[in-house]
Image (cartoon, helix red, strand yellow):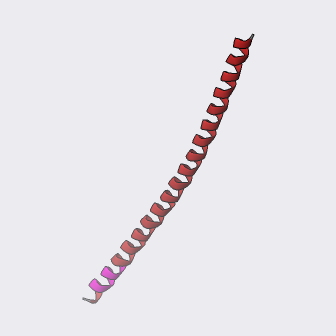
Amino acid sequence: MFFKLNYYLEKSSNLRKTKSQILTNSSEVTMINAILKQTILQSAALIFQALQTSHVVRCLDSCLSKEG
């Protein structure tokens, strides 16, 4: 009887540790997802800026070539 009780207590303890680890991993995944979303948004903003700059340069180049 004592061995069964000890066995179930040990299993219960292991399950609590596993649950705690899952919650920790879940928190880390949530944090990583937030970082990835922020990185994607920053990358998109940089691409947009580059496209705008490219467009302005083409317009200026076109205007200057017409004057020249």
Identify the image quadrant of the C terminus. bottom left
Instruction: Give the camera-side residue of 17 and 35.
Output: 17
Instruction: Give the camera-side residue of 39 and 32.
Output: 32
Instruction: Give the camera-side residue of 20 and 68.
Output: 20
Residue 63 relative to residue 36: left or right:
left
The answer to if 15 sits in the magenta stretch is no
Q: Above or below — where is 10 with respect to 55?
A: above
Q: Give coordinates of residue 48: x percent, y percent.
A: 45, 67
- Name the residue located 65 percent from the left edge and 34 percent from the top edge: 19
Identify the image quadrant of the N terminus. top right
Magenta part of the chain? 59-65
Residue 40 relative to residue 23: left or right:
left
Q: Give coordinates of residue 35: x percent, y percent.
A: 52, 55
- Quarter of the figure with residue 64: bottom left
- Name the residue located 68 percent from the left edge and 17 percent from the top edge: 7
Give the main secondary structure, helix, strand or loop, of the magenta stretch: helix
The answer to if 62 sits in the magenta stretch is yes
- Name the residue located 64 percent from the left edge and 37 percent from the top edge: 20
Residue 36 relative to residue 11: left or right:
left
In the image, farthest residue toward the left: 68
In the image, farthest residue toward the right: 1
Q: Give coordinates of residue 12: x percent, y percent.
A: 69, 25
